[in-house]
Image: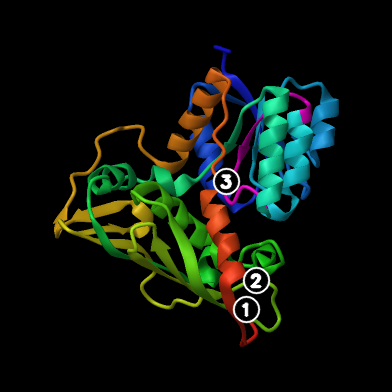
C-alpha cells in the first residue's frame, strides 16, 4: 500500500479533538475519510456516523480505524473492524482486560491486518534518550510519581470511575508505558494499596511497590486528588547518577544536567504514534504490547483495597 491510508476515527471525545485529529491532518500518509460518534458529533466536511456498522454499510472505502472510545466498549468495535480487513489503532489503554487484547491480536493475525496498541507517552521527547542512557546502567531504585487533578484533566468523564475505566490508572498506565520501555530489566508487583471512593468503582489513588529482576525497588504513587503543582515524574537512581524524566517524559535530566532538546521537527507524541502506525500498515505487521496493562492488572491482584471519601465533580 503506497497511497494515503484511508482512516476513520471511532469516538470523538477530548483526546480525539486535542491529539488525533491534528496529528492525522499533519500526516500526508493518512486521509481522514469518516468519523463515528454515538453522540452524533462530526468533523466539518467529513462523513459521520453514529456507529461502526453504519460506516461499514455506507460503502465508503476504509483501510484503517483509530479507536478513541472508552476501553469498556473497545473490543467489540475493534473485532468488527478487523473482520472487515481494516487495520486498527487502539488508543491507550488498549482494552478493558488482557484477554480482550490478546484475542484481538490473534484475530488480527488471522485476518492479516495490523493491530497497534499505542502508548503515546513512549513518544515523549525524553523517553528514547532515557532508554539509551539507562541501557548499561546499574539501577539502584526508581520512583514514579503521577499526581494530577482529575477535575481539571478529565472533567465530567464518569466512565473513568466506572468498572473497566481504570480510574487513576488511566494516566498511571502512561507512566508504566514509559517505565517498561526505558528500564533495562523487567519488573513485577510486590505489593499495592488502592483507594476507591465509596460512590465509585475505580481507584482515585494507588501506591504500588515493584521490584525488577536484579532486585532494584520501584515505587509508584498515583493520585487524582492533586492540588497545585501537577506531577508526572520518573526518577531512576543509577551507578552513574540520577536520571529524571519530568512532565510526562517531555523533560530529561541526567546527573543534574538537562539533556539537549530534540531537533526533529516531526517530534510529538501523537505525530509519532501515527508515523509508527503508518509504518506497521505499510509493512503488514502488528505491534501489540500488553506489558503496561499487565502491570495494572497485577496491581489489583496484589492490592489491599480501601474505601475512601465519595468523589463528586
Q: Is residue 174 left or right of residue 106?
A: left
Percent across and percent down for residue 221 are 43, 72
Mark pair 3, 1: CA separation? 30 Å
Whether residue 118 is visible to the viewer of this picture, yes or no, is yes
Mark pair 2, 1: CA separation? 6 Å
Out of 50 and 252, give the one closest to the viewer. Answer: 252
Quickly name the residue at label 1: 196
Percent across and percent down for residue 7 are 64, 28
Toward the front, the furthest residue is 214
Q: Quadrant of the N terminus?
A: top right
Question: Which badge, 3 or 1, comes first in the chain's sequence?
Answer: 3
Quickly name the residue at label 3: 17
Quickly name the residue at label 2: 202
Toward the top, the furthest residue is 2
- Contact, CB < 8 Å: mark 3 with mark 1? no
Q: How is the image coloured?
A: rainbow
Check disc 1 and report its element: helix, strand or loop.
strand
Check disc 2 and report its element: helix, strand or loop.
loop
Percent across and percent down for residue 225 are 50, 77
Out of 48 and 162, give the one closest to the viewer. Answer: 162
- Contact, CB < 8 Å: mark 2 with mark 1? yes
Magenta residue span: 83-95
Q: Identify whether 265 is placed above or below 181.
A: above
Mark pair 2, 3: CA separation? 25 Å
- Contact, CB < 8 Å: mark 2 with mark 3? no
Whether residue 86 is visible to the viewer of this picture, yes or no, is no
Amino acid at each position: 500500500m503506497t497511497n494515503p491510508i484511508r482512516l476513520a476515527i471511532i469516538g470523538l471525545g477530548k483526546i480525539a479533538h486535542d491529539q488525533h485529529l491534528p496529528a492525522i491532518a499533519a500526516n500526508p500518509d493518512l486521509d481522514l475519510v469518516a468519523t463515528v460518534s454515538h453522540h452524533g458529533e462530526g468533523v466539518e466536511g467529513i462523513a459521520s456516523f453514529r456507529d461502526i456498522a453504519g460506516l461499514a454499510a455506507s460503502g465508503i472505502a476504509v483501510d484503517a480505524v483509530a479507536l478513541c472510545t472508552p476501553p469498556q466498549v473497545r473490543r467489540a468495535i475493534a473485532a468488527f473492524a478487523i473482520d472487515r480487513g481494516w487495520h486498527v489503532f487502539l488508543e491507550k489503554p488498549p482494552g478493558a482486560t488482557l484477554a480482550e487484547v490478546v484475542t484481538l491480536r490473534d484475530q488480527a493475525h488471522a485476518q492479516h491486518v495490523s493491530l497497534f496498541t499505542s502508548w503515546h507517552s513512549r513518544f515523549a521527547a525524553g523517553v528514547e534518550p532515557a532508554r539509551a542512557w539507562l541501557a548499561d546502567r546499574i539501577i539502584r531504585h526508581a520512583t514514579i510519581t503521577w499526581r494530577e487533578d482529575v477535575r481539571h484533566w478529565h472533567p465530567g468523564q464518569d466512565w473513568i470511575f466506572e468498572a473497566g475505566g481504570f480510574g487513576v490508572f488511566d494516566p498511571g498506565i502512561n507512566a508504566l508505558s514509559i517505565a517498561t520501555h526505558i528500564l533495562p530489566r523487567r519488573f513485577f508487583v510486590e505489593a499495592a494499596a488502592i483507594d476507591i471512593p465509596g460512590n465509585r468503582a475505580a481507584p482515585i489513588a494507588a501506591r504500588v511497590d515493584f521490584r525488577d529482576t536484579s532486585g532494584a525497588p520501584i515505587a509508584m504513587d498515583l493520585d487524582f486528588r492533586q492540588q497545585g503543582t501537577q506531577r508526572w515524574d520518573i526518577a531512576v537512581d543509577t551507578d552513574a547518577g540520577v536520571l529524571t524524566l519530568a512532565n510526562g517524559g517531555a523533560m530529561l535530566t541526567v546527573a543534574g544536567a538537562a539533556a539537549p532538546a530534540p531537533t526533529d521537527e516531526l517530534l510529538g507524541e501523537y505525530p509519532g504514534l501515527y508515523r509508527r502506525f503508518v509504518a506497521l500498515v505499510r509493512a503488514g505487521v502488528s505491534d501489540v504490547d500488553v506489558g503496561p496493562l499487565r502491570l495494572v492488572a497485577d496491581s489489583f491482584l496484589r492490592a489491599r483495597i480501601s474505601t475512601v471519601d465519595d468523589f463528586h465533580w
